[in-house]
Image: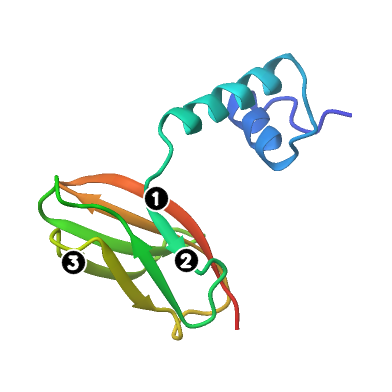
Amino acid sequence: MQIAIAGGPAVYMARAILDQEYDDELTGSLLRESQSLDDESSTNMTVYPNPTTGKITIEKDLSTYTNCNLSIFDMDGRVLLKTELPVSQNVFERKTDLIKPGMYVIQIFCDNQVIESIKFIVEK
């Protein structure tokens, strides 16, 4: 049974990501391409503990950048926190006690571009 007949490659890719077992000609190749891109551009940003209950620690070397900011987004794309990051530091801590339980995305912007993005979970 194919649910997403008229969705095009994006719908098939979403299905492949959500259901790793689904593998046909289109979905399998898109999933493998996505995974190889992820392997090549693996993140060197660390967020812990993940899931968290009170605060998160973010480790990222920003010494090669200028003008860096950290933003936390909910899964609907709304900005919950935006703060400047000193490029001279490698470890940053942020409280999450005002954030409702759920999944969120941390993005680091440096020199007007996104350089890192990672998901994290808040539990209470």
Q: Is residue 122 above or below residue 107?
A: below
The residue drawn where x is 41% and y is 63% is 73
**Residue on which disc 2 sits:** 48
Q: Which residue is mark 1?
A: 117
Q: Nearer the viewer, residue 36 or 70?
A: 36
Mark 2 to mark 1: distance in Å?
14 Å
Please name the amino acid that badge 3 sits on. Glu
Chain-order first, disc 1 or disc 3 = 3
Disc number at residue 84? 3
Q: Residue 45, position in %: x, y? A: 37, 52
121 versus 31 height, above or below: below
Q: What kind of element bears circle 3? A: strand
- Residue 116: x %, y % from top left: 34, 48
**Foreground residue among 65 and 3:** 65
Rendered residue at 40%/43% (across/down): 43
Q: Is residue 83 left or right of residue 47?
A: left
Q: Residues within 10 Å of mark 2 (few under 14, many from 20)?
A: few
The amino acid pointed to by label 1 is: Ser
